[in-house]
Image (cartoon, rainbow, N blue to C red):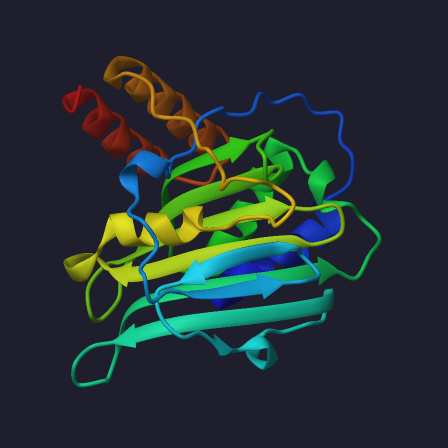
Amino acid sequence: MRKSILALLGACAVACTPSRDQVPAYAVSIFPVAESTRSPANGHDWKSDRCDYSITFSGVPIDVSKEVPQSNLSYVYSMQYIENNIEGNYKKYSEDAQCACPKNNGTPSNITKYQSAQAFGGAIKTMDYSIVKSSFIETSPLGKFAEFEATSPSMMGEIIARMRIYYGKQCIFVVTTEALRAGDDAPRAIAFLNSARNPNVPQSLPVANPPPQANDAASRLKALKDLLDQKLITPVQYEAKRQAIIDGM
């Protein structure tokens, strides 16, 4: 997924400039605080000075900045925490946090929902991932951000990835989790994403609670149609997801 993240950052180096498009932004996070658990007592905080954000890892993270291609970036700082299976021969859960600044003088916070979706699409196409749901928050205490949940097949089983990207004035702060579906702990993963904070903001990000089920279904159907219109999913995938949402009402 790190290559996918960097594809997104590279796209943003071009896309993060003012635009006239007026595509409405969603107002509700797909990773609400209500679905997350508190950060573990033995969690490990990490702060990126350039991005001015802190986040709490489940375990001790390591610096993997040297593994990140930097052709489109003037600065990158990347930390990762991994849990392997008992035998240690494959990854079962991971947490990533990256601060990256594009080389050009663009302003990431100028990005629009449409540009963000296009960047997502370009990034996802570099990997065998399918977007399940996504959201774009125009205004929050931590600034503008985009997020998505995606799945990908693997030899060990389906992988679930969750990502949130904060668009700052000069840099981007990206937080990601990956887990095998068989052992997925969604509350833990969402707690990691929601542990992002800014020392200049008194409280953690207060994400709005999800709307009632009927409204939630309507917003999911709208979001799904947006993905189809942006050609991020195929018509077959759209119909399957649409029917699943309707059946769940």
Q: Nearer the viewer, residue 99 or 206?
A: 206
In the rendered structure, the answer to whether residue 179 lies left or right of residue 114 reads left
Image quadrant in which you'd find residue 68: bottom right
Residue 105 % position (x, y): 84, 53
Residue at the spot 55% in from the left edge and 25% down from the top edge: 25
Image quadrant in which you'd find residue 50: bottom right
Q: Nearer the viewer, residue 190 or 59?
A: 59
Residue at the spot 38% in from the left edge and 58% down from the top edge: 177
Residue at the spot 66% in from the left edge and 61% down from the top edge: 100
Number of numbered labels in the structure image: 0
Give the answer, above or below, for where 243 lies relative to 110: above
In the rendered structure, the answer to whether residue 173 lies left or right of residue 157 reads right
Q: Nearer the viewer, residue 248 or 234?
A: 248
View extreme (right): residue: 105
Residue 196 % position (x, y): 50, 50
Residue at the spot 53% in from the left edge and 78% down from the top edge: 63
Residue 170 % position (x, y): 76, 51
Give the answer, above or below, for where 104 lies relative to 147: below
Residue 12 % position (x, y): 67, 50
Q: Is residue 125 visible?
A: no
The quadrant of the picture occupied by the C terminus is: top left
Q: Is residue 170 visible?
A: yes
Q: Nearer the viewer, residue 129 or 62?
A: 62
The quadrant of the picture occupied by the N terminus is: bottom left
